[in-house]
Every structure is written in structure tokens, then in C-alpha cells.
Image (spheres, coloured by chain):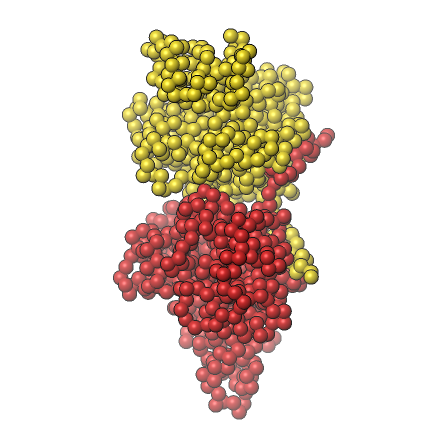
Chain colours: A yellow, B red
Amino acid sequence: MTNPYAVGLEQNPANYEPLSPLSFLPRAARTHPNRIAWIHGDRQATYAEYYQRCRRLASALQAHGIGRGDTVSIMAANVPAMLEAHYGVPMTGAVLNTLNFRLDASSIGFMLEHAETKILLTDREFAPTIAAALAKVTRKPLVIDIDDPVYTGPGDRLGVIEYEEFIQQGDPDFAWQRPTDEWDPISLNYTSGTTGNPKGVVFHHRGAYLQGMGNVLAWNLPNGPVYLWTLPMFHCNGWCFPWTISAVSGTHICLRRVDATKIFELIDAYGVTHLCGAPIVLSTLINGAQRENRRFERRLQIMTAASAPPSSTIAAMEALNVQICHAYGLTETYGPATLCEWHDEWDALPLDERAVLKSRQGVPYSVLEGLMVADPETLEPVPADGQTLGEVFFRGNIVMKGYLKNIKATEESFRGGWFHSGDLAVMHPNHYIELKDRSKDIIISGGENISSLEVEEILYRHPAVADVACVARPDEKWGETPCLFVDLRAGHEHVTPDDLISHCRQHLAGFKVPKTVVFGPLPRTSTGKIQKFVLRDRAAKL
Amino acid sequence: MTNPYAVGLEQNPANYEPLSPLSFLPRAARTHPNRIAWIHGDRQATYAEYYQRCRRLASALQAHGIGRGDTVSIMAANVPAMLEAHYGVPMTGAVLNTLNFRLDASSIGFMLEHAETKILLTDREFAPTIAAALAKVTRKPLVIDIDDPVYTGPGDRLGVIEYEEFIQQGDPDFAWQRPTDEWDPISLNYTSGTTGNPKGVVFHHRGAYLQGMGNVLAWNLPNGPVYLWTLPMFHCNGWCFPWTISAVSGTHICLRRVDATKIFELIDAYGVTHLCGAPIVLSTLINGAQRENRRFERRLQIMTAASAPPSSTIAAMEALNVQICHAYGLTETYGPATLCEWHDEWDALPLDERAVLKSRQGVPYSVLEGLMVADPETLEPVPADGQTLGEVFFRGNIVMKGYLKNIKATEESFRGGWFHSGDLAVMHPNHYIELKDRSKDIIISGGENISSLEVEEILYRHPAVADVACVARPDEKWGETPCLFVDLRAGHEHVTPDDLISHCRQHLAGFKVPKTVVFGPLPRTSTGKIQKFVLRDRAAKL
């Protein structure tokens, strides 16, 4: 028998087009040319203007030799040039590499070298780091300064031309080309990595397009949201929101720095409806709101990730008229790839129970095809019992292409046909996952696994504890023992290590109780994460 | 210079999965296992049950030899089996062919033959048509009856087994396979076509997935909508809503027949939030509401297509607390592919101006990459002046694979790298399109396409008919009805309109039978072509 569908139904230019998030912008510009695309300080651009500016950028880059296979890097706050780079750079066929402005010069230098950056756009605020980084780089990129009028602090111009002048050289009607293949790279994001050099995560057009859709479905994004940039765009391309917001013709409110007063001012001025941020953004808002004794008149939607919001945060947010969407993902999954999809019937539960449910990282995004918690070696899924620890694995179209020029790390991360996250979790009976720890943060004492998060959670219940981290300390007898680093609240300096240890003993199994307690402030990364590797070093030397 | 992105970043099972709308269902079933997936009469299924029933169907079909490249046809009202066929059939790798239950036996017979149908699921209500169609088919399919308890009218069982019994044979945990290629066919929908035999439009998994997303964005569909099936599922797979609704874990309310009283009852009983339908559905609702003097307490969203809603309809709908989304598309574009995307500032306009704006077919869906109004020969876009007539062209991932076993028609429809719709429109200065004329031979009655050529062909078989033209006559209830202009042969002047209408009734499906007959000579152009536009004007004035 022949298959009647096997002939005469091939792909052609009418029925096949490579998926790319770049297509969202011309659609928004044609449909809503006069809608405001971005606002920054006293500047703003309509969608028609935004699209023209992106084409100017693409045209000017191409005139400077940028094309397929090239990398353009950008070191900037959440300014319009950063948004525009998300379109202008890939419109030339090149790859956008966003740099974390909290990093040091040698990390940035490594990235510029490794990415083979041809052009670097750099915000004047970060000139000292960039100048030092460029000094280390062998192949010097062409440098373009972003001299944002909103920024009035120190910092030299380092380049040959300023961004606004540069894009004025470009053609506003530039006939940019869509990618010929949706698998083509669109961006490059370096992960801080825990050991060795940063790894360059490569996204493709297909994944960025699908994540654009995925964010809309996950968050029920309406047409025309007003989105405030509290999340750094250098984080996995701002979780793909520079593209997502165009898919729904929304308005970007730019923001250089997370500051509660400024955030409240922008929310009031522009009717912000949505924003994203790590828990630090949430606590900034809560503290600010308590100081100013305020509540949002319009319901504000906040997507948060990185760590589960505790019940006190959820309660404070509800009081502020904020709805929290809890998501989870990694740079390797284009940002959020799971979400704690809410059930209406959960609304009726008491706060504590709601907080427990909300703290879970949940279920796959609509555009993620596979999510499991499994044995890291055998890839056998753990039972959905809410107890058995396993590693989180991802599979699907919003998993990265791989790590740039690092075949070994790429192969390791994809072993067995799943992406290995390195995060440890349990699978609850309702098929919602709950993170327990990074695998490297697990403490193994006498052959037993101890979740550092579980220990920390107990410590956070103690009124004296402001900040805490639990790490492994090498031990001759046990292999490792839990070691606490604690920053005490002001006025609680009288609390002793024994006080905290006996508090733990009341709530934890004996083998999980820390053996060592060290007081003092905790070291954090540029993105606000506690640097546990620093603490592990300290613990080893105790 | 080597391209650093050219190596080590290939597709693998962790980062590439063929797109398929089938993935929406397991996700909904895992996330919301206890949410109601469908309600029909006094039966209902949760998402866990729905997914199991679909897997049972797939398993039972596979046990009966169904697999890749096979066609399974279904002739049914909007019942659960119809929804389940949208998953169960493609889960075997086979193609779902939905049949229009308003068609006559010879059309259905042609389709079964042409599609090489191996298994036919058929609703007992349509047994007479199917029995007659099967009598004409050379390769007899295996027939499975759908004996819906909600249907209590006449109609024999024709097959070897009833649907519920059939799926009980299947494995509820059947390990179905995703398509190996997202370009694989998922469904086959016959269009009435303007000339000759119906053409079989083939959809692929990629397009059905993207249209699933596209509908969500077009309609701002929230999570968990309650969707009422007023649109026949046999129309381009119900505009892809059997898949779309699973993408947002919504509830399907089944409905065998459009009936105002029943619709109001279901809206009240289940809190229906969304429904789709041709203008006939809108007028049925309006008339029913006026009769019963009612208004919906909760805002109801209705997506309509096929012809623009007039201002009286929009006003009546507003009074009913209904919001209209006006869309447009063809079977070849997976249903709606443009929409009249609303601008908030238009809300302030007076009703007449709002109706003018709302009557436009609008802008491309987010998932449609190209839409233009252009010269049919040169494909040169017309100016965006709201005046110059051109043909509507589509390009992108929600354009069909092609016509089954009809390379000539496929090639013609894709000439120049665009899909030729055959519809005429203007492009307004704001880049919203407005249809001016359907492809001139088509009559749209109650949302169904009627080919005037097909009707004329039947009339020409009548010995009294010398010359005939069939055109659309505007009709309040049906939108349009077929109107005949007939020049009788000398000596046959005794023939009456009723004679011709009963002749048609013998050879045509009921909805295709002309409602009006006018005798007299036909106006012709200098080259001898009948001037149908003159007749359309006359028909409008009757």
C-alpha cells in the first residue's frame, strides 16, 4: 500500500517559514504603530519608531561587517538600546551576547574572547570594568558607547561612536532577513558556572519564539501589558521577555536599577501591570511599601523565580494587591520552564497551605515537552511521593542548543537524551515538582543526604536569623557535616551557636543538625545569590 | 574565519521535539487531572479520563491496523467521540478526516474513496447518508457507530461495533507515539471548492500546534475557559479549538445542534465563557435572547467569521453582554488566520464607527507570517488606500501542506510562494484588510460554502434549462441563500420554480438547494460570460 500523504505535500515558501521571535516586532508595528513600545526617563518610542530603530541598528551593524555567525556583545542596564539589540543584532543573522554588569573584568574579558565578539555595545556606567576587560582581550572588538541621558554618574566613553549616532547611520527601512533555519543561533548567555570557566549557553530562533508564546500562556498575558524591567535583561535575555512583550504588543518600562521608590513612581505613572524579579525584588517592594504604607490600586502581576517565596512574602504581597506567579528554570531552558500553575480551588485554603502550594516549582511550561525528577545515573524517574529526592531533567524545544565551543560539557549535560539541571527535587503526588537543593549544595553525612535548603528553612523560623547558609564541612568521621553561616538581626547579638543548634534539634532529624555555626554577613554573587563555594572553602579551613 | 556556532550545537532528543498539539492533552491531564474536560448531556469526563479515553481509542484503532499514512474518517455532531478522535486518531500516526454531515451521499462517497478511509466512525443520526455513501464506495472501511445517548431520533446502526464498546477494547495507558516529524499530516478537511470535486486540505502537526497557540493569543484565552461547541467540529477541525482548549486546560461543552434555548441553558448551567460561530449562530442567539428577554450576567466572548457582523448585530450583542472577536480565514489556513485586533481607544467611538472598524477582517494572527492584498497575477501588493481591490494572500506556518492527491491544484494555489485565497479585499491605511467579495462563485449559507457551479451543473441536467446562473442572495437568517436565474428552453415554459427546486433536492444536500428562482434571459459580457455581479445586484433587490 502506498501512503497517499507521502507525495505532493512538501514544504514551500507559502506554507513554511522558520520560527523566529523577530516576526513579533513587525506585526506589532503594523498593528499598533502608535502604541508606546518603550518608555525610559523622558524618552519614549512608539512601535513604529521602535521597529525603525531596530532596523537602523541592524543596518548599521551590517555596514560594519556584522552577519551570520558573528557575535555582538552588550554590557548595559535595562535601557532601550538593550531592548533594541534583541532585534537589531539577530536581524543581521548575528548572535546577541548580553553581559552581566555585576561581573569583574577578567570574567568579562574571558567572555569577549571566547565569544569572539566583533562589536561591543557598552553602557558608560560600566566603563571601568569594560576598559579593564578590553585590555585583556587579544582580538579587540569595535566599541560603541551607550551614553544614556538618564545616567548621570561617572564613567568614560571608551568607543568610537555613541549608540544614538551609530543607529542614525542605519537605514530605518532596512530589509533585514529572517533566519534561513529556525535552528540558527539568536543569543549567547554565559552562566556563572560553579567550577572553571563560564559556559556559553546558545539559544536558537525556534526556542526563543516558542518561549515567547510559552510566557504568554504561563502568565495569561493579555494584549498590551505594561511591563516594568525589574529583571536584568542580561539574565537569559530577560527570560525572553524582550520578545514576549512584542508578541502581545505591550509597553516596556525601562529601569536602570531596582529601587522601591522609583518602582512605585513608575507603577503609578504608567499603570504597570506586570513585572518579573528574583525574591530580592519582592522584598525590596515589600519593605518599600511598608515604609510608605501603600497598596497598589490596580492588581499587579509578578513572576518570580530563583527561590520559592515564603508564606510571609505571599501574605505581604496579597496585602499589596500583588499576584505572584512562581516559576523556575535555568539559563539552559531560556529562563522559566516550569510554573506553579494555580488551581482556583486553592484560593479557599488558609494562607499557610496556599504558601506551601505556591512554593512548589510546579509543572512544565506549555512549550516544554518533558520534565522529570529522576535518578541522576539511571534516569529512572523517582516515585511521585513528595519524598524521594532526584535530579530535575528537562527535554524539549526550550532547551538550549548547547554550550558554545564546549562539546564535552554539552554532551555531559544532554546525556541520555535529557538536560541535566543539577538541581535536586521531589515529585509530589499531584505531579508538581519541588526543588530541594542544587546537587552540589547537598551535604552527605554518614552516607545520608541532607538538603541545605531544609536546614536553612528551619533556621529562618528563628527570630534572630536575618540571613543563613548551610554548607558541607569536611569531616573525618562523617565525610561531611552541616556547617551554618548566620547573619543575625540587629538586637539579637546575644544569640549563641548552641541556641541555634538546639532550635534545629527540635525540628530536624539528628544527622541533619549542624555541628558548626559561624556568625557574620554572607558573601553574595553579582546576581544576589549566596556564594556557597566561598563558604564551603571557609568551612573546610575551620 | 570559521563560524564558532557551526559545530557542536546540533539537535538531539533533549533539545528538539517535533511540535504537535497532541502534547497539550497529557500536560492538561497531569496538571489538572480532576478538571472537567468535557460535558455532554448528563455525561462528563475529567482531564484524566479524557486522556485515557483518547489513548483507548488510539490503542483500539492501532489494534485494527491503523497507523502512519492511514485515514480515519468521522461523521458526527459535536459529541465527545469527535473531540476524542482529534487526539486518538493522530496518536496512531494516522490522519483524521472529519466529514460535513450536511453533505449528500455522493459527496461523502467521493471523500471516503479519495481519502482511502480505512475506518469510519459515524453518528447514528447520519446513517441514511452514510449508508448511501458506503454503497458507492469500492474499498469499504470498517464502520464504527457512535450511538450517542443524547440523540433519540431515527437512524440505524451500520457498523460492526459501537464507539464506547470499541474504546473499551483499548488500553487506557497506551504508549502512543508523537510524530517523528512535525510536518507529518494530522488531519484532512475537504472544501467544497468552486469547480469540480472537493479538494482535501491536509494539515500538519506543526501548524495545528501553532494555531493552538495562535487562537490563545488572538482571543486572550485565559487558563480554564468554558467553551461551548456551537461551531461544527467538521469545519477545519473546529478552527483547531479541540486542540486549543487543551492548551489552556479548558472545559468543552458539547452540543449536537445550534438551538437558542439549549445554548442559554448550557451557558447558565456551566458558566460558558467562550464560543465560536458563523453569523447564523449570532442571529440565533440574538433572536432567542429577544424572545426570552435576557442578558448574560457574565461577559461572554464570541469569535465569529465567514462574514462581517453588521452594526445591528454588534449593538444587539453588546446589549446581551457579549464581546465579539471578528476573525477570518479558510480551511487552507487552519480556520481563522486574521483577526480584527481591537484598539482600546476605539471603545470611545459611536456604535456606527465601531461597527465599521469591527467589520474589517484585520491583521494576521501572531502565528501567520505573511498577509497581503495583491494583484492576482503579478502578486504586487495594492496600495493601502482602502480602495484598491486585490486578492488576499497568505504565507506562513498555518497554511496547509497542500491538497491531497492533487498536485495541480496545490501548485496553483501556492504559485509565487503565497497561498492564493481567491477572496477579494482592500488594504486600509492602518493595515487592516477588509473583504469585498468572496471568491465570486461561492455562496455562504449558514456558514457553509456552496459552489454555484455545482448547483448550476445539476440544473443543466434538467431538460427545461437552457441557461442558468446561481448567485448569492442576502438573507437575514442564513447570511446568504442560493438564488437561481434561469432561461428556459422554448416549449418548457410550463416548468415552475418548484419543479426546479425539487429537481435540486434530489441531487443536492439540503442547504445547497436554491430558495429563489427567477426566469428570464441572462445578462452576458461581450465575450459571452454571464455577468454575475449584475445578477447579485438583482438578487439583493428581490
Taking depth in this image into account, of A79 and B279 the one nearest to the observer is B279
Say if B273 sits above or below B509 in the image: above
Q: Quadrant of the N terminus of chain B?
A: top right
Taking depth in this image into account, of A506 and B375 the one nearest to the observer is A506
A17 lies left or right of A429: right
> Quick one: which residue is furthest to the right in this view?
B1
Q: Position of residue B217 (x, y in %)?
A: 46, 46
Q: Identify the residue at image location x=46%, y=12%.
A: A515
Say if B90 sits above or below A352 in the image.
below
Residue displayed at 41% across by 21% down: A508
On the picture, is A284 further left or further right than B434? left
**Whole-percent x and y of residue B108?**
55, 69
Q: Quadrant of the C terminus of chain B?
A: bottom left
**Where's residue A399, x and y in %?**
57, 36
Outermost residue, left side: B293
Outermost residue, bottom side: B491
Residue A398 at least partly seen: yes
Q: Residue at x 68, y 19 (%)?
A: A138
Q: How many marks?
A: 0
Q: Residue at 51% of width from left, 20% of height from top?
A: A443
| Front in this rendered view, residue B365 or B181 | B181
The picture places residue B452, in percent across and down from the top left corner, at: 53, 72
Viewer can see residue B384 = no
Vertical arrangement, residue A45 with respect to residue A537, above or below: below
Q: Quadrant of residue A35?
A: top left
